[in-house]
Image: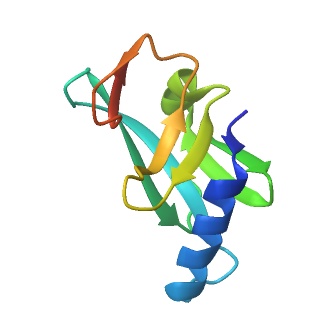
């Protein structure tokens, strides 16, 4: 399962309204090689399902990831931190053994 915190839900809703996206758009999360810790998160809006997509609906937000990425993301919570010192969107990933200082990459 992938989880969406209230803070992320609110920000995602704002982005969808601002960009005037239709209801068929969802959040796609992917893990790729790279970053200072070895693996990086990528997040975008998408409206096309792909073979082997894992689809989750939490807190009223549809989140989709491919099967390979899900192996790294299982039980991860998408969060958002705003304000002057905020990080923006970030992942609270219990599978990560370490993360880099910026929080954009991780290792297992």
* Residue 52 visible in this rendered orientation of the protein: no
Q: Position of residue 65 (x, y in %)?
A: 56, 43
How many numbered markers are drawn? Answer: 0
Residue 19 percent location from the top left of the image: 49, 85
Which residue lies at the image location 44% right of the left edge and 42% below the top edge? 30
Image coordinates of residue 93 in percent, x first then y, are 55, 26
Which sits in the foreground, 89 or 74? 89
Residue 60: quadrant of the picture: bottom right
Vertical order, 89 against 102 (above or below):
below
Residue 35 in the image, given as x and y percentages of width and height: 21, 31
Q: In this rendering, would 8 be left or right of 31?
A: right
Residue at the spot x=65%, y=56% of the render? 7
The colour scheme applied to this rendered structure is rainbow
Res. 60 in view: yes
Q: Residue at x 70, y 46 (%)?
A: 55
**Relative side of 58 to 104, left or right:** right
């Amino acid at each position: 399962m992938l989880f969406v915190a209230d803070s992320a839900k609110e920000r995602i809703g704002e982005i969808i309204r601002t960009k005037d996206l239709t209801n068929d758009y969802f959040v796609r999360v992917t893990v790729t090689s790279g970053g200072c810790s070895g693996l990086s998160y990528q997040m975008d809006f998408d409206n096309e399902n792909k073979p082997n997509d894992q689809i989750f609906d939490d807190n009223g937000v549809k989140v989709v990831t491919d099967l390979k990425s899900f192996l790294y993301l299982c039980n991860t919570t998408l969060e958002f931190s705003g304000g002057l010192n905020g990080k923006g969107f970030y992942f609270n990933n219990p599978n990560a053994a370490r993360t880099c200082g910026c929080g954009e990459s991780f290792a297992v």
